[in-house]
Image (cartoon, rainbow, N blue to C red):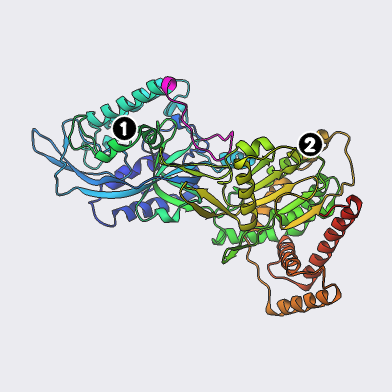
Amino acid sequence: SSCGERGLLLCVPCFVAQHTPNSDWEKKVTDYFREKLKENNATNWVPSLNDVPVHYLKPNSLVKFRCMVQDMFDPEFYMGVYETVDPNTNARVLHFGKYRDVAECGPQQEIDMNSSQTVTLERQTFYCVPVPGESAWVKEISFFSDQARVSPSTSYTPSRHKRSYEEDEDMEQHPSKQKEQHMGSGGDSHGCGEPKRLETEASAGHHLISPNCSPPLDLNFPLPGEKGPACLVKVRKGDEHSYEADNLKWQGEKSVTFSSLLVPLPRDSSTLDPMECMDTAEEQRVHSPPSSLVPRIHVILAHKLQHLNPLLPACLNEEESKTFVSNFMSELSPVRAELLGFLTHALLGDSLAAEYLILHLISTVYARRDVLPLGKFTVNLSGCPRNSIFTEHIYRIIQQLVPASYRLQMTIENMNHSRFIPRKDYTANRLVSGILQLASNTSLVIDETQLEQGQLDTKGVHNVKALGNLITWQKVDYDFSYHQMEFPCNINVLITSEGRSLLPSDCQVQLQPQIIPPNMEEYVNSLQTAVLPSVLNKFRIYLSLLRLLDYSISDEVTKAVEEDFVEMRKNDPESITADDLHRTLLVARFLSLSAGQTTLSRERWLRAKQLEALRKARLQQQKCVNGNEL
């Protein structure tokens, strides 16, 4: 039968209650939702935690969440199937613990801890945060493309938080008000008093203690100033390895229970888990935060995102997506020309720097050979005015084009005091985030024009080293105190500097402004307002789509390139190196892709050589002017 919006929010408990416990009921639930969410763009009607405030959402409702995995907690055990007994009538009822934080039972029932029907299962908890540095236009488009709008009149009222939580308690203590008609076994799933008592006591205690005795809860976002909900995402055992350190979209049931207890037990029970008691107060605080701040999601479906651009189809391999790609590729040439013109104006009339900026923005690590990342293209844009607002405006332009970005101002203060790499906090048993814990294909703009004279301390030196490792090896070494663990990444790094950067780069481009606007602020604002929103969206699709295309070089062209390189070495053996060949091949790759060509042609190879010759000539000219090595 077809499900409307309200049906989607309620059919998990309905479906589960109608199936006996066996090995494939969980697969049936997943298949059911996978099919239902394909009907009439049903996914758009599911509320997103990225857009809808938590207090607008009912407990145990279907939600989705676009996020990055920031940390993975220890596995937890819970009762996947358990049995309750009525002490008066000895009637027994079987329950499912899946998609629940707390085992539920009726008001006149008790959980039979010794039942032979009990099945203990294991699940993994991920700590997930919104995608770091996600651009405002991504949030805006995602919000308007999702038709789900949760009305306060049918859910929680944001101006009456206290009343909302009381309604939560009432709903959980007497779920028959909402669920009885949906449950296959009538009133057998009513929340019992004991677990709710424990939950309200824990919640009240937290609210009393937090403001006066504890510091505010740190949501552990990698970047400063980030907003949005962090979530505890619970995944069945066996699926967790598919999701580690990825950009994901979860779809599942939202639980608003504060307590992470999975079995309701009396406070004086001798059967309390001793490991629970061994947790430090800090660990309990981090792993069991108030659900009003950190909601719980029990995963039904999860998708590993190919990209973060809401203007592109989520999966480019589907037939409908291929039509979209084909139609866009047919108009690629004018889009590229307009983007080149736009970036040329942004770079004060420098068309060569604009060409290299396009190549940089579509670059991506497409493979790794041993430890060497292939496809990275870090550009050092030198010649930028010192302490000028120019670099800030360049970042604002990039922010309008890419789905996720961050501007790192390379001041002595930031280098000495910021935390760049994540580290393990063994007291709280969590991974404390760092600035370099970013989503794949995030644009990181390092503003070196902000660097002034001063002394780097030990932390500053380590941070500079971390940036170097990121650029050279596309990896971040997480600090686990007793050892470091390498995590591969795929970050597009652009360095703006006055002279040659202190950091390594794949390509240095000397900026040669052709115009000097009297008012930079007005110039950039007029540039941005002059671009139609529809054209800006084409730029965004262009940059995201091209980095997803496959690319190859035929044997014939490979042979021609090798012969050409030999000739170049004969003519100028001292200045042409293997690094030059590698860089020119990279430029040729991205030049071809920027024109929509997935193979290298002789024309593109010659154009790549021409661009490289122009770039090197500029550097040589600057070297002669300054008398310094660039």
Residue 118 % position (x, y): 19, 47
Spatial CA span between label 2 and label 1:
61 Å
Q: Residue furthest left?
A: 89
Residue 227 among those drawn in magenta: yes
Q: Who's the residue at 57% across and 35% down the image?
A: 226
Q: Who's the residue at 66% across and 71% down the image?
A: 552
Magenta stretch: dominant SS?
Answer: loop
Foreground pick, 334 / 242: 242
Dot 1 amino acid type: Gln
Q: Quadrant of the C terminus?
A: bottom right
Q: Quadrant of residue 192?
A: top left
Q: Which residue is the site of mark 1?
A: 178
The tag on residue 387 is 2
Estimate how packed mark 1 is, as few (under 14), some (14 to 19) or many (20 or more) residues with alpha carbons within 10 Å: few
Residue 143 among those drawn in magenta: no
The magenta stretch is 211-228
Looking at the image, residue 196 sits to the left or right of residue 239; the answer is: left
Foreground pick, 486 / 533: 486
Q: Label 1's element?
A: helix
Residue 7 % position (x, y): 38, 41
Q: Is 504 above or below relative to 385?
A: below
Residue 624 % position (x, y): 90, 55
Instruction: Pick whichever of labels 2 and 1 is earlier in the sequence.
Output: 1
